[in-house]
Image (cartoon, grey):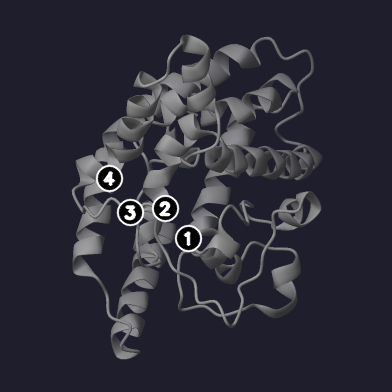
């Protein structure tokens, strides 16, 4: 359990070698596709992403240790426990984790305190497999891990929750690309590259859509689904662009804006309203 980290929430620090090889091959194939299709590949964007990812290694380990300890402590007080060896626990757990992830991800867009971390992931201005690695450094403080805490109290073993979250986030690596088109009937059930391109769009019609992890079902149920429009090409990146590729600036820009906004508040109540309200 301690070997997991959070950004979008816990991701395994020790990827199976086979999966790591597949991800690397996918990234290299995509680079070739972008160059051959004359879409280009922004080396500076890649450098910025790798810089942010390097910083995330350290912060991710610290977050994993803290959150892992909290989950293990809370697990002691679960009134019932789903048996880890029962497939039904994994089936129900999958739905529960996806449901909690949807609300975590949605809150990360709708609550400014959480957006300050998540905005880092939306800062790339082209969508590539490698851009999936551009993750915020401040997950412990933004509190996204709290959304999965009720699952531990409901009796789901922390190992089950973290394993399913790791699957969720490894799956999403393959959504960050323009190289894969629509996937037919699968588009109704699964989160797909097409759906995730919408999620990363800064166009007004695409903002705050498609929060799902592996499945897109909860977006359809709760009215946050949007399909890509043929007459509206997706424009990637933040609506308010930092203009920088410095990893430190990318990781802290939204926090600096948030603290500047709260410092202008006339009283504590207003400051909390700014911090917990929607991003400006």
* Discs 1, 2 touching: Cβ within 8 Å: yes
Q: At x 42% / y 64%, what residue is drawn?
A: 236
The residues tagged by marks 1 and 2 sit, at their Cα atoms, a distance apart of 9 Å
The residues tagged by marks 1 and 3 sit, at their Cα atoms, a distance apart of 10 Å
Quarter occupied by residue 243: bottom left
Instruction: Name the residue tied to disc 3.
Output: 241
Q: Earlier in the sequence, mark 4 or mark 2?
A: 2
> Mark 4 Cα within 10 Å, few/some/many (few <14, many 20+)?
many
Element type where label 4 sits in the image:
helix
Q: At x 31% / y 76%, what residue is drawn?
A: 31
Instruction: Name the residue tied to disc 1.
Output: 202
Instruction: Name the residue tied to disc 4.
Output: 250
Q: Earlier in the sequence, mark 1 or mark 4?
A: 1
Numbered tag placed on residue 122 in the rendering: 2
Tell me if I can see residue 54 in this picture.
Answer: no
Q: Earlier in the sequence, mark 3 or mark 4?
A: 3
Q: Nearer the viewer, mark 3 or mark 4?
A: 3
Q: At x 69% / y 9%, what residue is drawn?
A: 77
The residues tagged by marks 4 and 2 sit, at their Cα atoms, a distance apart of 10 Å
Q: Is residue 37 left or right of residue 174?
A: left
Q: Nearer the viewer, mark 1 or mark 2?
A: 1
In the image, residue 69 above or below residue 55:
above
Quarter occupied by residue 249: top left
Q: At x 41% / y 56%, what residue is drawn?
A: 132
Q: Earlier in the sequence, mark 2 or mark 3?
A: 2
The residues tagged by marks 3 and 4 sit, at their Cα atoms, a distance apart of 10 Å
The x and y percentages for residue 144 are 53, 31
* Discs 1, 4 touching: Cβ within 8 Å: no
Element type where label 2 sits in the image:
helix
The residues tagged by marks 1 and 4 sit, at their Cα atoms, a distance apart of 17 Å
Element type where label 3 sits in the image:
loop
The x and y percentages for residue 173 are 47, 59
């Amino acid at each position: 359990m301690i070997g997991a980290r959070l950004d979008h929430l816990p991701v395994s620090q020790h990827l199976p070698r086979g999966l790591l090889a597949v991800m690397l091959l996918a990234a290299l194939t995509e680079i070739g596709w972008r160059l051959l299709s004359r879409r280009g590949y922004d080396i500076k964007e890649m450098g910025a992403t790798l810089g942010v990812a390097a910083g995330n290694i350290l912060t991710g380990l610290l977050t994993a240790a803290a959150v892992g300890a909290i989950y293990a402590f809370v697990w002691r007080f679960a009134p019932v426990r789903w048996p880890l060896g029962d497939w039904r626990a994994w089936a129900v757990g999958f739905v529960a984790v996806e449901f909690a992830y949807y609300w975590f991800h949605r809150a990360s867009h709708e609550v400014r305190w959480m957006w300050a971390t998540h905005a880092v992931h939306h800062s790339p201005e082209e969508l590539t497999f490698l851009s999936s690695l551009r993750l915020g450094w401040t997950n412990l403080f933004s509190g996204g891990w709290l959304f999965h805490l009720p699952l531990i109290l409901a009796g789901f073993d922390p190992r089950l929750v973290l394993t399913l979250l790791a699957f969720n986030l490894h799956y999403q690596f393959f959504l960050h690309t323009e190289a894969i088109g629509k996937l037919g009937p699968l588009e109704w059930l699964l989160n797909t590259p097409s759906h995730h391109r919408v999620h990363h769009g800064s166009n007004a019609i695409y903002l705050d859509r498609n929060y799902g992890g592996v499945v897109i079902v909860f977006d359809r149920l709760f009215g946050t689904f949007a399909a890509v429009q043929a007459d509206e090409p997706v424009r990637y990146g933040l609506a308010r662009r930092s203009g920088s590729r410095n990893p430190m600036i990318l990781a802290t820009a939204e926090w600096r804006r948030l603290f500047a906004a709260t410092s202008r508040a006339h009283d504590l109540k207003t400051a909390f309203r700014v911090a917990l309200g929607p991003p400006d």
